[in-house]
Amino acid sequence: MTHLAHSPISLGKLKLKNRVFYAPLAGCSDFPFRKMSAKYNPGLICTEMVKMDALVRYDSHTLHILDYSSDMHPIAAQICGSKPALAGKSARIIEELGFDLVDLNCGCPVDKVTKDGSGSGLLKNPNLIGEILSNMTAAVKIPVTVKIRAGWDHNDICVSEIVKIAEEAGAQAICIHGRTREQGYKGPANWDYIKMGKQVAKNIKVIGNGDVLDGPSAERMFQETGCDAVLVARGTMGQPWIVQEILAYLAGRPLNQKSIEECRQALFEHFLDCKNYYQDHRVCVDMRRVGCWYFKKSLGTKRFRELISRASSLDFIEELIKNFSIGEDGIEEVDSTEMQD
């Protein structure tokens, strides 16, 4: 049985092959992360958020964040800012860089982002969101989308209003995170807010986000909200293949649960991608957390996570990943004279 998620979806002239998208994750969705993700063919992947102010200056660090390779298409870039005067130019730069879609972030809850009215700070001024989106859509031919939270807090839910404004401004899709800015990442996402947005949408596509971690939760999201697509965030960390697991579940096919050995192989591949892209120190720092992602659900892997979380050399990391012993319930022992750095 084919589920809606398997069906192509069109955002303007852009046709995506399935409806399971991977979220932009600050500090996570870097080039190696997206390199791993692209191998499993999600409908869309996205870069980490970049600031309009830096983008229009062609800041080298910002452009580095936007690096991508041809195998990552279709790919979106997400921009953040609260100045309509910069919105069109920023979107145009994204288009010129070859991205398939540009997304406006109206959901980031971090204080350093919201203090100037950006990110979820824009939820306090829905009309400004409309002005920014209008400038973006007028400047580019690629689809423009927007990602929001349900509201600033539970007393200020603005989903329905922003869906209408975004549609009027020409946005092709709106992604609704079922948490408020006040919640941050705590507590369950309220999918009723996503349903609320879908009910007032006319032509704009609605993407559901929040607590989609596997096939069953994705199915519930589609059923309970009527959304057109789902955006997977935390569920992608250490599971670049989650799109395949979700689509298999929704099609009623048996799930191929990844073994410890398959997770180890994937982690090693991710390590090599990092090694080929970053300088040694950055690789070590990143692998302290990335290494823990791939085994967060596995029994008996505590010792491995302890060792990799304090790794400080590439040789140490490579030997650890390649040579730890695997038992029935996970890692039995790492024999490397404590794998000294």
Image (cartoon, helix red, strand yellow):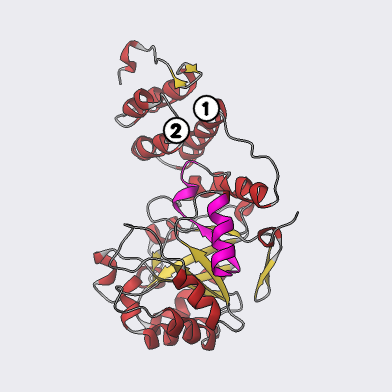
Amino acid type of the residue tagged 1 in the rendering:
Ile
Q: Nearer the viewer, residue 316 or 191?
A: 191
Q: Nearer the viewer, residue 4 or 308?
A: 4
Q: Position of residue 89 (x, y in %)?
A: 46, 79
Q: Position of residue 317 (x, y in %)?
A: 40, 26
Q: Is residue 233 magenta?
A: yes
Vertically, is 90 above or below 314? below
Q: Is residue 146 magenta?
A: no
Q: Nearer the viewer, residue 97 or 289?
A: 289
| Callout 2: SS | loop
Give the residue drawn at x 62%, y 60%. 74
268 displayed left or right of 131 = right
Q: Position of residue 166 (x, y in %)?
A: 49, 83
Which residue occupies the extreme right position in the image?
Answer: 1
Q: Position of residue 202 (x, y in %)?
A: 60, 84
Gap between marks 1 and 2, in whole Å? 8 Å
Which of the numbered marks, if any, corresponds to residue 295? 2
Q: Quadrant of residue 9?
A: bottom right
Q: Are marks 1 and 2 in contact (CB under 8 Å)?
A: yes
Q: Which residues are magenta?
A: 216-238
Q: Which residue is mark 1?
A: 260
| Callout 1: SS | helix
Vertically, is 46 above or below 52? above
Counting residues from the start of the chain, the first of labels 1 and 2 encountered is 1
